[in-house]
Amino acid sequence: MVIIMEIKFTQAQTLKEKPDPSTLGFGKIFTDHMFMMEWNNETGWQNARIVPFGYLSIHPASTCLHYGSEIFEGLKAYRRADGKVQLFRPIENIRRMNNSADRLCLPKIPEDMALEIYTKFVETEQDWTPSAEGTSLYLRPFMFGNDESLGVHAVHNATFMIIASPVGSYYAEGINPVKIMIESEDVRAVVGGTGEAKCGGNYAASNRAGERAEEKGYSQVLWLDGVERKYIEEVGAMNVMFKINGEIVVPMLTGSILPGITRKSCLEVLRNEGYKVVERRISVDELAEAMKNGTLEEAWGTGTAAVVSPIGELCYKDIKYTVNDGKIGEVTQHLYDTLTGIQWGKIEDTYGWTYPID
């Protein structure tokens, strides 16, 4: 690899004990180090470094604390059967983060620079990548505006960081079907807003509905569009797909839906294998009718955190519908096996998606 920038390294004085893989949840334990660098509008990116994991000190007037100037990403490093570590489609995460940065007037990171940073950081922390079934090292790149003054404007100073966490399943149910509530009151995003950007405000605004769903025993909320409140968009932490009467129906990207990398990967697998796939708008009434008449054969969510998660129950306006007898469906299982097989190096990557860490 051609060296794009110097990355300084400061070794943590005391290394943490690695956790028992069987006890891993999601995002609770962090590795020994973190990556940091700063940007300003005069000198660009500078002071790239890997330092001991620790607390931050920022100015009380920092832009991110007052005006939501923050974006983030999520990707994983996987331990292959031969012991080596690899990333899954990192360039897609880099491009999506740059798209988010553009929407929130934050600085972009050149793709080759970002890939070098990801590679060097994972090389440093790769001993934290677990090898147990269903585990991985979750990477959380994030960026925030850091101007030390009040006032609404494009940022002049920003900080980019990466932290990492060894993880197990995102949902307590694991690969077992989850229960999802269709939200009919709050909305997540509208076209022209920040729905297709991965920024903290989108998730903060979803918490109220998420709390209501959790109180009723549901894992996540399925959002409707923010204008007509009629069309299916996405689940809180996942994109969503349906098998209706033999056809794979996927809500189309409209500008208010996050363009998921796992979503994109599933679509490529399905089309490559000859499934009938259509991306279009699907109304909640159409979905409800399919649930009533039994033509909804499968439903599943897709995302980096959960990979592929089967949906066993949908609730709309307090009416509960069981999907596929509450069991994982054939297509859902196949997608999960295919993606995780590629990610963990168990099956050949004919798509060129994996990026090995030497």
Image: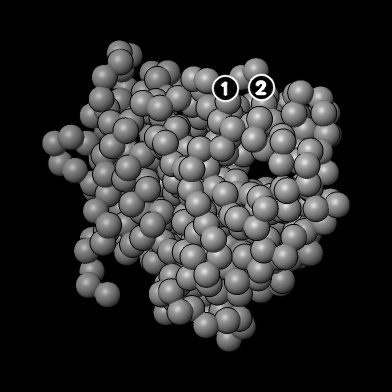
Please name whichever residue, 265 or 281, is drawn nearer the observer in this view of the structure.
281
Q: Nearer the viewer, residue 9 or 2?
A: 2
Q: Is residue 246 above or below residue 321?
A: below
Residue type at numbered disc 2: Ser
Query: What residue is at 43 percent from the left and 64 percent from the top?
Result: 89
* Amino acid type, residue under disc 1 in the picture: Arg
Instruction: Of the two numbered discs 2 and 1 on the same chain, state the one appearing first in sequence.
Output: 2
Find residue 222 and report its horizontal and vertical position in percent.
65, 35
Q: Is residue 133 left or right of residue 267?
A: right
Q: Quarter of the image holding residue 83?
A: bottom right
Residue furthest to the bottom in view is 82
Residue placed under numbered mark 1 in the picture: 229
Instruction: Measuring from the top left, give residue 221's x and y in whole percent.
Output: 67, 33
Q: Which mark is residue 184?
A: 2
**Disc 2, SS:** loop
Q: Is residue 140 visible?
A: no
